[in-house]
């Protein structure tokens, strides 16, 4: 049962009643993230998210954590490309406490200059950690290829050069600009009484004042040819990403894209897992994933491969991409992909936290398709021909991007490029 309310100040509240649950999961979603930034402040959304956890005018960092963990709950947050979220999972009788703590954090962070300087150093270590992780860094290189000179191509954590210039004044300006009621969604899932929870929200958040709406920089692909980005690093494996521009979250082919992903590399029954790992032993890690943003998307194949096996692995991947463009998926395999999608969705939504994260992500993006029966109907309507046609549109040579991190030579680069044929 869903209950949606909009307060007079524009703040949106979604209550998802899960009557037999003992936990309540609650999230404050802000409509800002990496893609709302620019070359002068890249990483500020993530920096502000860190600072929100450093204390408020009335609660220290330690008290914030103890308030939730002291009742057996959990407290966390994250920054994405299109949203920032702060959330708790608590026993149901502590629902108001969870909202009180979250709203205090998000709306009244102290942002002390001393803590900002200290946390900046923490984020510098985070930046180094990600660069040292080849599976993460190869993805960042791919994003730079796919979204050049665009916020989606910049690292969410920012860079040391940019973060050095972000101080209390800039953090406050950014917060005042985006942390406005019409840009906030409160999503709660669990055993909730609607009237009681709305009273809690009005008590803790009704004083927020409206601001001006803000837009992100829209993206339109102008890619004309295959692109690559290779980074030489002395490690044991080659880390590979192959990415294609894909449909957005509002496109009619979104669910077709999701099924295409499952068939190719979404689970252990997928074609790439079977061919690359099980049949030929070329990789331990091989998978595919999709990203659906508001106006663009990505279809990404990732693998970790021994340098001696890389060319062969790429040949096998290319063969599978060609195959799905030319040959209709058989009914048994196609039905398994549909059943996998539907089963994963239903099992995920059994948990209050997973449901809150799923629902909040949709609401903050103004995606109104959150009725699971309607989503399952949309999945059932996808046909093998639709998957084949979408594969033809996505897997084109001039839509291909490849990034590599590992011990790669000039000779290896030429051999790899020659095998990138779909």
Image: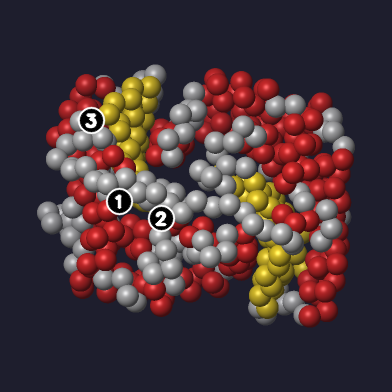
The residue drawn where x is 25% and y is 41% is: 181
Residue 10 or 362: which is nearer the viewer? 10
| Secondary element at tag 3 | loop
Per the model, the C-alpha gap separating discs 2 and 3 is 25 Å
| Cα distance between the residues tagged 1 and 2 | 10 Å
Q: Are the residues flagged by discs 1 and 3 in contact, CB closer than 8 Å?
A: no
Label 3, on which residue?
Answer: 7
Q: Nearer the viewer, residue 67 or 333?
A: 333
Which residue in the structure is indicated by mark 1?
178
**Labels 2 and 3: the sequence-earlier one:** 3
Counting residues from the start of the chain, the first of labels 1 and 3 encountered is: 3
For the residues bearing labels 1 and 2, Cβ distance under 8 angstroms: yes
Q: What kind of element bears circle 2? A: helix
Percent from the top left, x then y, of residue 42? 41, 65
Badge 2 local density, few (<14 within 10 Å), some, or many (20+)? Answer: many
Residue at 61 percent across and 28 percent down: it is 343
Q: Which residue is mark 2?
A: 36
**Where, by quadrant of the figure, is residue 242 drawn?**
bottom right
Please tell me which residue lies in front, 158 or 250.
Answer: 250
Q: Which mark is residue 354?
A: none
| Above-or-below relation of 398 to 27 | below
Secondary structure beneath label 1: helix
Q: Spatial distance from mark 1 to mark 3, Cα to Cα?
A: 18 Å
Answer few, some or many: residues within 10 Å of disc 1's Cα (few below 14, many 20 plus, some between 14 and 19): many
Position in image of residue 361 (x %, y %): 44, 40
**Residue 34 on image: x %, y %:** 44, 57
Which percent across, then down, holds residue 260? 72, 39
Residue found at x 58% / y 52%: 220
Label 1 vs 2, first from the N-terminus: 2
Q: Give the class, few, some or many, for how many residues have Cα within 10 Å of label 3's Cα (few <14, many ≥20).
A: some
Which quarter shows the N terminus?
Answer: top left
């Amino acid at each position: 049962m869903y209950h949606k309310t909009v307060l007079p100040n524009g703040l949106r509240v979604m209550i998802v009643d899960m009557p037999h649950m003992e936990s309540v999961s609650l999230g404050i979603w802000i409509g800002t993230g990496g893609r709302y930034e620019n070359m002068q402040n890249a990483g500020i959304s993530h920096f502000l998210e860190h600072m929100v956890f450093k204390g408020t005018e009335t609660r220290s960092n330690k008290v914030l954590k103890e308030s939730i963990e002291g009742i057996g709950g959990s407290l966390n947050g994250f920054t994405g490309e299109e949203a920032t979220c702060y959330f708790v999972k608590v026993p149901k009788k502590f629902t108001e406490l969870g909202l009180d703590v979250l709203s205090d954090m998000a709306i009244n962070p102290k942002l002390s200059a001393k803590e900002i300087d200290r946390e900046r150093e923490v984020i510098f270590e985070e930046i180094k950690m990600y660069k040292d992780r080849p599976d993460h860094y190869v993805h960042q290189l791919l994003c730079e290829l796919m979204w050049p000179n665009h916020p989606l191509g910049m690292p969410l954590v920012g860079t040391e050069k940019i973060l050095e210039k972000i101080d209390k004044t800039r953090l406050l300006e950014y917060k005042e600009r985006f942390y406005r009621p019409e840009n906030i969604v409160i999503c709660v899932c669990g055993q909730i009484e609607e009237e009681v929870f709305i009273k809690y929200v009005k008590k803790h958040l009704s004083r927020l004042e409206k601001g001006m709406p803000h837009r992100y920089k829209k993206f339109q692909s102008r890619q004309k040819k295959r692109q690559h980005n290779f980074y030489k690093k002395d490690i044991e494996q080659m880390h590979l990403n192959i990415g294609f521009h894909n449909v957005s979250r509002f496109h009619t082919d979104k669910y077709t894209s999701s099924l295409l992903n499952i068939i190719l590399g979404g689970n252990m029954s997928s074609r790439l897992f079977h061919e690359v790992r099980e049949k030929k032993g070329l990789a331990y890690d091989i998978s595919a994933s999709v990203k659906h943003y508001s106006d663009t998307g990505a279809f990404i194949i990732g693998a970790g491969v021994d340098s001696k096996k890389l060319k062969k692995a790429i040949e096998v991947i290319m063969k599978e991409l060609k195959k799905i463009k030319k040959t209709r998926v058989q009914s048994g395999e196609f039905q398994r992909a549909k059943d996998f999608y539907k089963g994963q969705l239903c099992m995920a939504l059994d948990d209050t936290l997973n449901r809150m994260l799923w629902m909040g992500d949709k609401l903050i993006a103004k995606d109104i398709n959150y009725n699971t029966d309607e989503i399952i109907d949309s999945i059932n309507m996808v046909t093998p021909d639709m998957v084949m046609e979408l594969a033809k549109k996505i897997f084109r040579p001039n839509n291909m991007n490849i990034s590599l991190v590992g011990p790669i030579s000039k000779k290896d680069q030429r051999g790899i490029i020659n095998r990138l044929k779909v």
